[in-house]
Amino acid sequence: MGAIIEYENVEIERADRLVMKNVTFSIGEGEFRYLVGRVGSGKSSLLKTMYADVEIPRGDRAEVLGFNLLDLRRRDIPMLRRKVGIVFQDFQLLQDRSAAANLRFVLAATGWKSKSDMDDRIAEVLKEVGMENKAYKMPHELSGGEQQRIVIARALLNSPRLILADEPTGNLDPQTGYQIVSLLHRLAEEGTAVLMATHNMQMVEDFPASLMRCGDKRLQTESF
């Protein structure tokens, strides 16, 4: 199983403040991994380095899907982000258009041209997340869990090998949150690596997987 994320002795800074140091880990194809730690421990900052939203100032190695983050050209950032699926806690759906139109917007923005190809891909990812009958719904007509399923469908559009999920259950009730985590685990079983940040340790116990723990500006990897 090849590694799709490899970090070695990486430092992370935000606003000239050291957030994490000596970050070393790797994640392989189809692996599910939790990222845990207190608020402010660096979870989101670490995730953001992986799609070049936060620059890495120093490190011996930092690679995601073959992209060298230590020497990444600005023009290559859109290509990196196209290969990574990102799931946010606060959904970030466009409120003025339907679920399907939200997905079509992303496909058009990432270079898809054929309307029929876009329609086929939208139908595929909506079915994957169990939302094939909600394509016409506006975001405000969907529950929180349904909106998060649309967000996961959006993350799947360009068939990413990696999904980064930043507290994807943070705004959901426990039952709905468990459904979302179960879905992410299934995607990993199907071959997409998933790194999920969470503070819900009960969920980690109920859906076990290896985890990385942020604390004291360091990252510790723990197997289950």
Image (spheres, grey):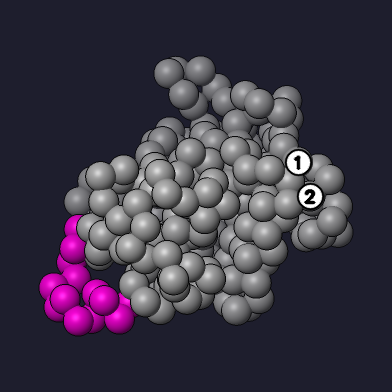
Q: Which residue is drawn at 41% across and 36% down?
A: 54
- Check contact, mark 1 vs mark 2: CB within 8 A: yes
Kindly give the residue lying farthest to the front in the view shown: 141
Q: Which mark is residue 203?
A: 2
Image quarter in which the N terminus is found: bottom right
Q: Which mark is residue 99?
A: none
110 within the magenta span:
yes
Q: In this view, does 133 lie to the left or right of 193?
A: left
**Front-most of residues 200 and 35:** 200
Predominant SS along the magenta part? helix
Residue 16 in which image quadrant = top left
| Residue 12 placement (x, y as % from top left) | 52, 32
User: With respect to residue 132, does 65 lie above or below?
Assistant: above
From where the camera sits, is residue 13 visible?
Answer: yes
Amino acid at circle 2: Met
Dot 1 lies on which element?
loop
> For mark 2, does the 10 Å Cα neighbourhood hold few (<14), some (14 to 19), or many (20 or more) residues?
some
Dot 2 lies on which element?
helix
Q: In this view, does 192 lie to the left or right of 198?
A: left
**Front-most of residues 1 and 153:** 153
Amino acid at circle 1: Asn
Q: Which residue is drawn at 19% across and 63% down?
A: 108
Residues at marks 1 and 2, CA–CA distance in whole angstroms: 5 Å
**Front-most of residues 130 and 185:** 130
- The stretch in magenta equals 108-121
